[in-house]
Image (cartoon, helix red, strand yellow):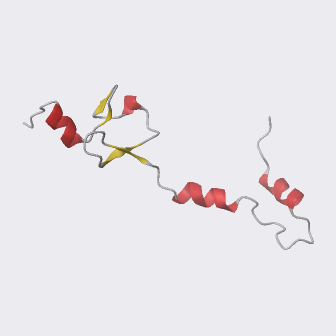
């Protein structure tokens, strides 16, 4: 399958007599992709926003507890009694 050719799509949607001829037919998609901040995961104990996006795989996170979910560092340290040296 060939990739979508946006120039051809523009010309198919908007003819030469149309005011929109040559404009991007999907302008909102590019804007949203550049500016939209990913939804962040919340700590399952205290509810604050963690540093990990919801779509991040659990193998690449710290303080994730399987069966419970994502914890912030403070809650993880408190629950598992981690001491700072």
Q: Percent from the top left, x then y, of residue 80?
A: 16, 30
User: Which of the two residues, 43 or 16, is positioned nearer the viewer here?
Assistant: 43
Residue 21 spot, x, y in % from top left: 84, 68
Relative to 7, is 23 above or below? below
Give the total number of marks visible in the rendering. Answer: 0
Q: Nearer the viewer, residue 84 or 47?
A: 47
Occupied quadrant, residue 16: bottom right
Q: Which quadrant is the N terminus positioned in?
A: top right
Q: Is residue 79 above or below residue 30?
A: above
Query: Residue at 87% across / 64% down in the picture?
Result: 14
Q: In which quadrant is the C terminus drawn?
A: top left
- The percent coordinates of residue 48 (x first, y second) are 29, 49
Q: Is residue 58 left or right of residue 65?
A: right
Quarter of the view holding residue 63? top left
Q: Residue at x 17, y 33 (%)?
A: 79
Instruction: Pick out the residue farthest to the top.
Output: 67
> Where, by quadrant of the figure, is residue 8 drawn?
bottom right
Give the residue displayed 32% in from the left and 30% down from the top: 68
Residue at left offset 77%, top offset 66%: 23
52 to the left or right of 74: right
| Residue 20 versus residue 32 in the image, above or below | below
């Amino acid at each position: 399958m060939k990739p979508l050719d946006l120039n051809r799509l523009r010309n198919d949607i908007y003819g030469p007599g149309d005011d929109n001829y040559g404009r991007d037919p999907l302008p909102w998609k590019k804007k949203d992709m550049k500016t939209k901040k990913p939804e962040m995961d919340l700590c399952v104990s205290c509810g604050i926003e963690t540093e990990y996006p919801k779509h991040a795989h659990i193998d690449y996170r710290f303080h994730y507890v399987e069966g419970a979910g994502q914890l912030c560092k403070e809650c993880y340290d408190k629950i598992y009694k981690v001491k700072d040296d």
